[in-house]
Image (spheres, grey):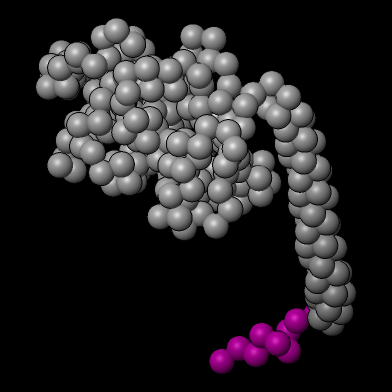
Amino acid sequence: MLNIRSLKHEKESLYLTISAIVGVLLWIIIIIVSIGTIFIYGIIMAFGLWITQQYFKAVIYGNSVKVSESQYQEINGIIVDYCKELGLIIAPDVFIVNGQGTVNAVAVKFLSKKYVILYSDLVDLMLKRKEINELKMIIAHELAHHAAGHINIGKNLLIGPATFIPFLGPAYSRACELTADRIAHKLTNDHEASMRALISLANGSESLASSINIESFKNQEAQIPPFFGFLHEIFGTHPRMTKRIIELEKLN
């Protein structure tokens, strides 16, 4: 058998040793620089989030009404009860803001601070009709986003690169919405009110919301052109409302 080692040039071992030492040193430098870069970017991002949070706090506290033990006690009671059931030790700050025609609610988080924003038009749509369980469904839905970690900064940073894969980010977002619907449906414990709450978001009419035919609305899904319905869905961060109603109906 040929003795390969005996035929190696004497400088090969020398240069291999030098290359190995230099290589290890460079790898150490690369790792240190990478960690340092990540750390610096982390600090910059954290500082940016802190600034955003402080500015948001200045706006929301100065121009909206915070729900508390001394302000809108019935709504506050719903929030306290649901936070206990969801295991939210620190309840999000909940504000009623001027909807200016927008019927919506939003869950927001900056660093460790959590918020739920209820637009006044949505609150009026439900309370003027004395449909407190519909409002409970919406509040529970937004609290569920916090409880399920959907707006957790660490998780969203982890999956951030995946958003560059076409349609994956919206698909995850749609799944989160359906999860929040399920949790809220369970908390509300009123199947019809849960569905009516979602349809009220689509309807937006105080005069017509109570007379909506749930079955008829659900059947609208069958009238959607399959291909264009698919296109609409894959780009959306929320499932269309007809699908959300169909998903809720499965829970009955």
Position of the C terminus by quadrant: top left
Residue drawn at point x = 66 percent, y = 41 percent: 110
Residue 121 at x, y = what percent? 46, 15
**Residue 229 is a magenta residue:** no
In terms of depth relative to the viewer, which is nearer, 189 or 37?
Answer: 189
Q: Residue 66: x and y, percent? A: 62, 32
Q: Nearer the viewer, residue 173 or 12?
A: 173
Identity of the residue drawn at 83% across and 78% down? 17
- Find residue 28 and report its image quarter: bottom right
Whether residue 206 sits left or right of residue 36 in the image: it is left
Residue 159: where, in percent of width, then height?
54, 46
240 relative to 6 in the view: left or right: left
Residues rendered magenta in the picture: 1-9
Residue 15 in percent (x, y) is at: 85, 74
Q: Is residue 48 left or right of residue 83?
A: right
Q: Where, by quadrant of the figure, is residue 35 drawn?
A: bottom right
Q: Residue at x 73, y 84 (%)?
A: 7
Say if 243 sits above or below 109 in the image.
above
Residue 239 against residue 165 in the figure, above or below: above
Magenta segment includes 8: yes
For the point 78% across and 62% down, the residue is: 31
Tell me how many marks there are.
0
Res 83 visible: yes
Please indicate, yes or no, whether residue 145 appears anywhere in the rendered image: no
Work out whether 31 lies above or below 157.
below
Residue nearest the observer in this picture, 199 or 24: 199
Q: Residue furthest front?
A: 70
The N terminus: image quadrant: bottom right
